Image (spheres, helix red, strand yellow):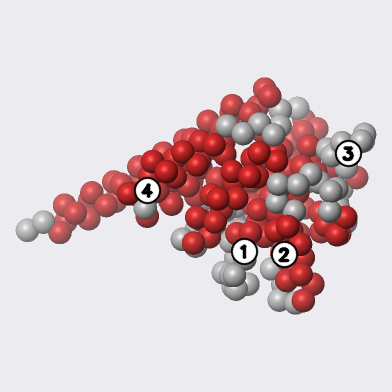
């Protein structure tokens, strides 16, 4: 357990560093974001042109030891490819990854909180959004997770709702352990309902204040 906790800090820090590179305004970052988007739903290692962004500089202990990608590699790869979709069409001064950094340790939106905020802006679409959210958080295979998450990320992008992608990478690491998966799901569910409930309460208070 101690080793896994140390790994998650490295995963967060490494993912944050890679996102900072992708947010730089240059031809390399634009090209790499496009390549990452093509990697959504694929297996780490399937596209050699992505090795540079998700493997270069990775701490040795996060590398896989056998023929399959490590849990860390799956988590980082999935977070970076989804971030690339989320950032598509956005300027660098509107990052779609906001939250954790090694300096502040602050957390931004989890997957659950971001979806709850989305519901608060689209109450009439809540059943459809909730079905999509349920499909994401009940996926077992990461290729299936990415397939369902793609549509969710597109909805978040449309509403300019960011995610904390280093935090997502950590969540996805734990998600691969059967004994921790339901804990991650529960936290996403709590964040979802907490965010949607808070916004509903704010709307109710504003309506009451507007009454004569």
- Taking the image as shown, residue 66 lies to the left or right of residue 26, namely right
Mark sitting earlier along the chain (1/2): 2
Secondary element type, mark 2: helix
**Residue 49, percent from left and from top:** 85, 59
- The residue beneath circle 3 is 64
Comparing 119 with 186, the one in front is: 119
Mark sitting earlier along the chain (3/2): 2
Q: Residue furthest top?
A: 179
The answer to whether residue 13 of the structure is visible from this angle is no
- The residue beneath circle 2 is 33
Using the image, tell me which numbered label, if any, was put on residue 68: none
User: How far separated are the C-alphas under marks 3 and 2?
Assistant: 24 Å
User: How far separated are the C-alphas under marks 1 and 4?
Assistant: 23 Å
- The residue beneath circle 1 is 87
Using the image, tell me which numbered label, if any, was put on residue 125: 4
**Residue 106, percent from left and from top:** 59, 52
């Amino acid at each position: 357990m101690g080793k896994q906790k140390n790994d998650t800090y490295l995963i967060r820090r490494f993912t944050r560093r890679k996102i900072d590179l992708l947010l730089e305004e240059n031809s390399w970052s634009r090209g790499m974001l496009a390549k990452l988007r093509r990697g959504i739903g694929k297996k780490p290692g399937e596209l050699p042109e992505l090795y540079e962004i998700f493997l270069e500089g990775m701490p040795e202990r996060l590398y896989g030891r056998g023929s399959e990608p490590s849990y860390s590699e799956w988590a980082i790869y999935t977070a970076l490819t989804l971030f690339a979709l989320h950032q598509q069409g956005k300027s660098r001064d509107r990052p779609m990854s906001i939250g954790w950094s090694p300096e502040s340790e602050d957390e931004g939106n989890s997957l659950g909180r971001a979806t709850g905020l989305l519901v608060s802006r689209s109450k009439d679409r809540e059943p459809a959004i909730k079905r999509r959210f349920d499909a994401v958080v009940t996926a077992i295979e990461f290729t299936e997770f990415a397939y369902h998450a793609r549509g969710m990320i597109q909805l978040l992008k449309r509403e300019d709702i960011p995610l904390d992608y280093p935090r997502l990478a950590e969540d996805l690491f734990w998600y691969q352990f059967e004994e921790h998966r339901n804990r991650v799901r529960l936290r996403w569910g709590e964040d979802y309902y907490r965010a949607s409930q808070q916004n509903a309460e704010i709307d109710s208070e504003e309506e009451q204040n507007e009454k004569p």
